[in-house]
Amino acid sequence: MSSFYSLDELKTLGFKSIGNNVLLSKKASFYSPETISFGDNVRVDDFCVLSGEITTGNYVHISAYVACYAKAGLRIGNFCGISPRSSIYTVSDDFSGEYMISPMVPDNLTKLRQGRVVLENYTQLGANSIVMPGVKLKEGAVSGAFSLVLKDLDEWTINFGIPCKFYQHRKKDIIKLSEKIL
Ligand SMILES: CC(=O)SCCNC(=O)CCNC(=O)[C@H](O)C(C)(C)COP(=O)(O)OP(=O)(O)OC[C@H]1O[C@@H](n2cnc3c(N)ncnc32)[C@H](O)[C@@H]1OP(=O)(O)O
């Protein structure tokens, strides 16, 4: 028995839209599927949590244990990947002590920082990356393993660290390689 939903099963899950060859693990959790759209050739592995407004392009891989908390919106482009145990936050609480932190207390006692996260084409998050609200990985940008991505990452760059910073420029050979499969 496959660990991915069959085409018939996918149609019953209520996604906003779903492309061809979409492989979604039965062990992943999809909250608010009506706000989630998948392009073609997308795979989501075991133990992922996808919630909120999420749109993916084509050829996207979301690896095991990835969490996307996308209340404020997450757009993933073409040929993008999210390596295991990474987390994307589009909403984060105020930790200053001026406000409470919990979804279980009244909203007027909390303060949320929100911002759409965008992973442009050819971007990749290394394993255990954490992306905070409002961040954009510009085309071809990658983060290394265990990166804390607080600010936008520039086009075609390799970045890592806490906080995540520029390390070196990235080659663009993958553009030509990807054209071979289109
Ligand atoms: C899709 C999948 O493959 S899922 C499997 C998980 N794989 C990943 O997450 C891959 C992520 N890749 C990385 O983190 C890589 O280390 C990269 C891309 C950031 C850098 O790779 P390279 O250019 O080969 O770097 P290299 O190993 O030569 O290290 C260069 C320096 O950066 C440091 N460094 C490398 N990666 C990191 C990192 N993620 N965090 C902190 N420091 C790092 C190294 O210690 C080294 O420092 P030094 O010069 O003081 O010795």
Image: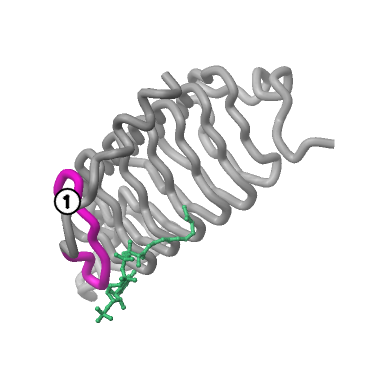
Residue 173 against residue 55 in the figure, above or below: below
Q: Provide the residue span drawn in magenta.
A: 153-165
In the image, taking residue 171 as reference, residue 40 lies left or right, namely: right
The three-letter amino acid code for the residue at tag 1 is Asp
Q: Residue furthest right?
A: 1
Check disc 1 and report its element: helix, strand or loop: loop
Q: Main secondary structure of the magenta part?
A: loop
Residue 128 in the image: state x and y as whole percent. Answer: 43, 64
Residue 66 in the image: state x and y as whole percent. Answer: 50, 53
In the image, what residue occupies the spot 31% across and 48% down? 90
Residue 18 in the image: state x and y as whole percent. Answer: 53, 20
In the image, what residue occupies the spot 29% across and 52% down? 142
Question: Which residue corresponds to mark 1?
Answer: 152
In the image, taking residue 31 as reference, residue 6 lies left or right, namely: right
Q: Nearer the viewer, residue 3 or 41?
A: 41
- The tally of labels here is 1
Q: Is mark 1 within 8 Å of ligand 1?
A: no
In the image, what residue occupies the spot 17% across and 60% down? 168
